[in-house]
Amino acid sequence: MFESVMRFFILCFFAAGFLSIADHSQAIASDLQSVLAENSKSIERPSRLTVGKTINKLFDSGVNGVPNFLKRWRDKQVWFRKKDRKFFFGPDERGEIKLIDIDTGKVVGSASSRILKQIKPNSGVRSVIGAALVRFQLSDPDPNVRAAALQTLERNANAGQLKPLRSSIPSEADPVLKSRKERLERLLTISFGETPEARILAIEHFKGDVGIDVRAALNQLLATTMAVAVTLPEDKNIARKLRVDVDLSRGEAHARLAKAGFAPPPLDKIARDAAIISKAVDGQVEGIPLSELNTETARMEAYRALAIAGAVPAFLSSNELDTLLNTHVFFEVYAEPNRRLTDAALDSLESINLTVGLNQVIDLSLDGISLASIYFLAAIGLAITFGVMRVINMAHGEFIMMGAYTGYVVQQFITDYTLSIVVALPLAFAVTFAVGVAMERLVIRHLMHRPLETLLATFGISIALQQLAKNIFGTQAVPLTAPSWLDGSLIFNDIVSISYIRIAIFVLAAIFCISLLYILRKTRLGLEVRTVTQNPSMASSMGINPDRINMLTFGLGSGIAGIAGVAIGLFAQVTSEVGANYIVQSFMTVVVGGVGSIVGTLAGAGMIGSLQKVIEWFNPSNTLAAQTYMIIFVIIFIQFRPRGIIALKGRAAEG
């Protein structure tokens, strides 16, 4: 009886002790300062390898204020007082520090930074803390904070962040952020989903999606490693079998066998010869004089003898290697062991690749249209002067250059880039129109119907204008800055995009095409130009002055080249050679399209621009080759259509 009573009291004593310890532990865990004290060493000296465990302990404690502490910790606003080993919040500065209580948020005093220790996590630790904060920021009331957290996850996410991301989706009020969250949730499910069914469903959702992030997630599933075995293993997710001399060389196969322990490593000739020399005794190796080791066969025999004697590592003969290659199978195995997942990934990736191909065609078409609009602007002035006057103006590129420099000069006086471009376009037309008229009056009209002399004269003017530009503006490129609203690109997806500058040039080319067609077909000047183009003698007899029409036409073509120069200068370097870079393409565009035809020039620009982009797509690193192929194409084309796509009658069609 006495023993039973004693046992009862002892049990009560231990129970009371355990309850006291539990109550004490609960008291310790009731405030953040106590939890920090328990982890003070890892907080005081954090490292990227250990900070994750410390953060988990803080979260597991269940105390309030952990997210705020992590944010302050990341921002270097945590101070440690050594005398009582307490943590405080304080500014990231030196001198007298105002100390803020970690639990209450109230100022509790101040101290010199000399007697305190500032907790300064390095960039690696700060990145880990930032990733841990994401789970709270995803549901932050501020949409900017949520967007920043989502961007962090999009760059780098792990399995632990999938659950908080999912829980934040139903309460997301911003439709754009909600769509991004749902997309990211499915992407993370591909890699970290709880069940194969959920992962497969996420994979199938992205069929036809051209996003780079989707392809990256699927390619992780389809990553493979090479392996070798006696027989193909049934417990592995095999990607494909490899054939020696087809999928891998004999040397690679030998190295793989050696790495797997099925064969000695390949014999290196330098190492072999060094081993032979090191084993030489009295000028002989296994009874073979060194003087006789002057052939590859002799050295192999000497090494074989050393290997038989056990003096050097063994090696495989060609026949032995053949035997091993025939008795082993080489294969690639997926990193993902579940065959259903890799099959679903392959199926989705096939659909994605088809969509990617279609989008690449669209993107290539946009590039071709963009380049065609540039060539059209550069060539339309040349088409008019060449079609009406039959003058080969080798200085046409310099009118483009003058237009670009006009835009640059305007921006030196008008700092508003939008207004400067509005002013530069008509001013460039006026300047180059005047220079064109002067050139026609002083030079061209005296060399009419003498094409060789005209070509040489305009070529000389081209060189003179380039040198004049160098003397005025120097040899270095000068900036012609586009307005801010032309910055960036119109992005349709990760493949298809076009810069706003190219869109603006396309619109400008369309405006010029419509305007010139209207002028040539609906106005008196256009009627006179068409009359002089088709039959100058008849035009003269009807009271039309061909000399005046020639002057106005040459000035008009030169003025259009000036406007093209402003447009080209917005994305190309403005130098004295900027126009010369487009003169060859301009002539090709005019010849292919049809001399003197606006619609023909448009068609020629479309053909030249599109074909050049296609050629560059096959050989993107060599644009010179693309231009060479284009010249060959033009030579072949004019053999079959010497008058171009749209041939005019009259003087423009004369040989």
Image (cartoon, rainbow, N blue to C red):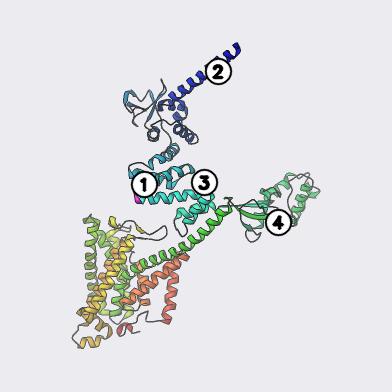
Tell me if residue 179 comes above or below residue 137 in the rendering: below
Measured Cα–Cα span from mark 4 to mark 2: 74 Å
Measured Cα–Cα span from mark 1 to mark 2: 54 Å
- Looking at the rendered structure, the kind of residue marked 3 is Glu
Nearer to us of marks 4 and 2 is: 2
Q: Which residue is mark 2?
A: 11
Q: Residues within 10 Å of mark 4 (few under 14, many from 20)?
A: some
Q: CB atoms at circles 1 and 3 under 8 Å apart?
A: no
Measured Cα–Cα span from mark 4 to mark 3: 41 Å
Tell me if residue 311 comes above or below residue 417 in the rendering: above
Nearer to us of marks 1 and 2 is: 2
Q: Which sits earlier in the primary sequence, circle 1 or circle 4?
A: 1
- Looking at the rendered structure, the kind of residue marked 2 is Leu
Q: Which mark is residue 194?
A: 3
Q: Which mark is residue 325?
A: 4
- Looking at the rendered structure, the kind of residue marked 1 is Glu
Tell me if residue 105 comes above or below residue 437 in the rendering: above
Q: Nearer the viewer, residue 509 or 563?
A: 509
Q: Which residue is mark 1?
A: 172
Q: Residues within 10 Å of mark 2 (few under 14, many from 20)?
A: few
Helix, strand or loop at label 4? It is helix
Q: Is residue 264 left or right of residue 190?
A: right
Q: Is residue 268 left or right of residue 488?
A: right
User: Visible in this render: residue 295?
Assistant: no
- Looking at the rendered structure, the kind of residue marked 4 is Leu
Instruction: Determine which quarter of the picture holds residue 518.
Output: bottom left
Q: Identify the residue at horizontal 24%, vertical 84% (top origin).
A: 531
Q: CB atoms at circles 4 and 2 under 8 Å apart?
A: no
Q: Judge whether residue 592 is colored magenta.
A: no
- Range of magenta residues: 169-175
Q: Which sits earlier in the primary sequence, circle 3 or circle 2?
A: 2
